[in-house]
Image (cartoon, grey):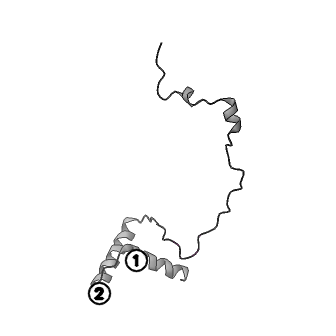
Amino acid sequence: MSKKPEGDLGSMAISKARAAETVPFSTAPPAPRVPPAPGGSPKSLTVKLDGELYAALRAYCYEQERASGSRLTHQQVMVEALKKLLGR
């Protein structure tokens, strides 16, 4: 007699009585989806730039760093640009 493989679905079988007692889904309605409040946790955003635009962004950051003496990241530039664009 051959041994059943470990992934055999027959090992997952339950009796009809036990199946009848099982509640597959909760009867409670799903909670309404509430949009997050402003100022919540930060969200990530990935932006793909073509080579020319990326080079311009790098050059801008480099020039601003040289002028101010402090580091300026690409993300800081893009966040400030979005704020200005959205009027915030």
Mark seen at residue 86:
none
Left or right position of 70 against 21: left
Mark 1 or 2, nearer chain start: 2
Q: Amino acid at mark 2?
A: Ala
Q: Name the one closer to the observer, 14 or 70.
A: 14
Is 70 in the magenta?
no
Indicate whether 7 appears above or below 72: above
Kindly identify which residue carries mark 2.
67
Q: Amino acid at mark 1?
A: Gln
- Residue 60 place in picture, x, y as percent: 34, 78
Separation of residues labelled 1 and 2 (CA atoms): 16 Å
Q: Residue at x 33, y 73 (%)?
A: 58
Circle 1 Cα neighbour tier, 10 Å, few/some/many (<14 / 14–19 / ≥20) = few
Kindly identify which residue carries mark 1.
76
The prevailing secondary structure element of the residues shown in magenta is loop
Q: Name the one closer to the observer, 57 or 25.
A: 25
Please, what secondary structure does the residue beneath circle 1 have?
helix
- Residue 53 place in picture, x, y as percent: 39, 70
Where are the magenta residues, as a range?
36-40
Q: Residue at x 29, y 87 (%)?
A: 67
Indicate whether 85 appears above or below 53: below
- Residue 49 place in picture, x, y as percent: 41, 66
Left or right position of 75 against 39: left
Q: Name the one closer to the observer, 19 or 5.
A: 19
Q: Residue at x 40, y 65 (%)?
A: 50
User: Within the image, what quadrant is residue 76 found in?
Assistant: bottom left
Q: Residue at x 57, y 31 (%)?
A: 12
- Nearest to the eye among marks 1 and 2: give it: 1
Q: Residue furthest top?
A: 1
Indicate whether 10 appears above or below 40: above
